[in-house]
Image (cartoon, grey):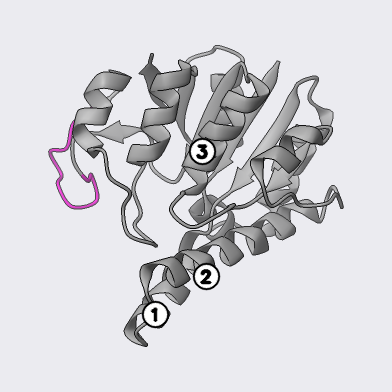
Amino acid sequence: MKIVISLGGSVISEMNGNYIKKFAEFVSSSEHSFYIVVGGGKIAREYISFARSLGADEEYLDRIGIMATRLNAMLLNTFFMKKIPETIEEAKSMSPPVIMGGTEPGHSTDAVAAMLAREVKADKLIIATNVDGIYDRDPAVYKDAKKFDRISINELRKMVGDKWNMAGKNVVVDAIACRIIDGAKIKTFVVYGKEIDEIKNAIYGREFKGTEIVV
């Protein structure tokens, strides 16, 4: 199978090298073809916040975020030592495993992963994050937030709206990614990425900790 994984920067930046090593070993030993898009996480949010306070505009802030995603991608790429593509077209032309970060302003790494999944005709898109699925509202703020084991893409799109969030905004699945997932009917799973076994479970069709997005 062709598997695209949007690996949240929060999963990379908040974990130790042992996690990254185990993730790389899983990708290397698997029979599947992997395309990994790495997010910016904490380092991106901190730099973006600081640059915003200095007066940078949103496009420039996006570019800072993209650099952070590529830095995190380089960290994972330590175990592969392959060229890190900077466009969807370049990534599509490479042999798996492909490791990359963001591409251009206005697109989150989730959106990049969705576009890549569409272009390579991936069997599954796995969004690996530090949250154990999609909730009706922020579970870090609301203790009574309801988690969805399954949610239709139509319902999710109503929740997230249709507009791109500002640079550094931390959301589970953004509007652009949802639109691409909907249009291309990509089988998508939001997974608790801090546990590699949960990523494996979603890939192999087993019960997993997260949310299935029904297209």
Q: For the residue carrying disc 2, how many other residues have a C-alpha within 10 Å: few (<14), some (14-19), or many (20+)?
A: many
Q: Quadrant of residue 88?
A: top right
Q: Main secondary structure of the magenta part?
A: loop
Q: Which residue is mark 1?
A: 56
Relative to 8, residue 95 above or below? above
Residue at 76% in and 52% down? 84
Q: CA distance from mark 1 to mark 2?
A: 10 Å
Q: Residue 148 location, x and y as percent?
A: 27, 24
Q: Is residue 81 above or below residue 145?
A: below
Alpha carbons under labels 3 and 1: distance apart = 30 Å
Name the residue type under label 3: Ala
Query: In the rendered view, does 207 fall on the left or right side of 34?
Result: left
Judging by the rendered image, the residue that carries numbered circle 2 is 64
Between 79 and 99, the one lying in front of the other is 99
Determine which quarter of the picture holds residue 89. top right
Q: Earlier in the sequence, mark 3 or mark 1?
A: 1
Q: Position of residue 11 (x, y in %)?
A: 53, 50
- Say what amino acid the circle numbered 2 marks: Ile
Residue matched to label 3: 128
- Tell me the kind of residue under disc 1: Ala
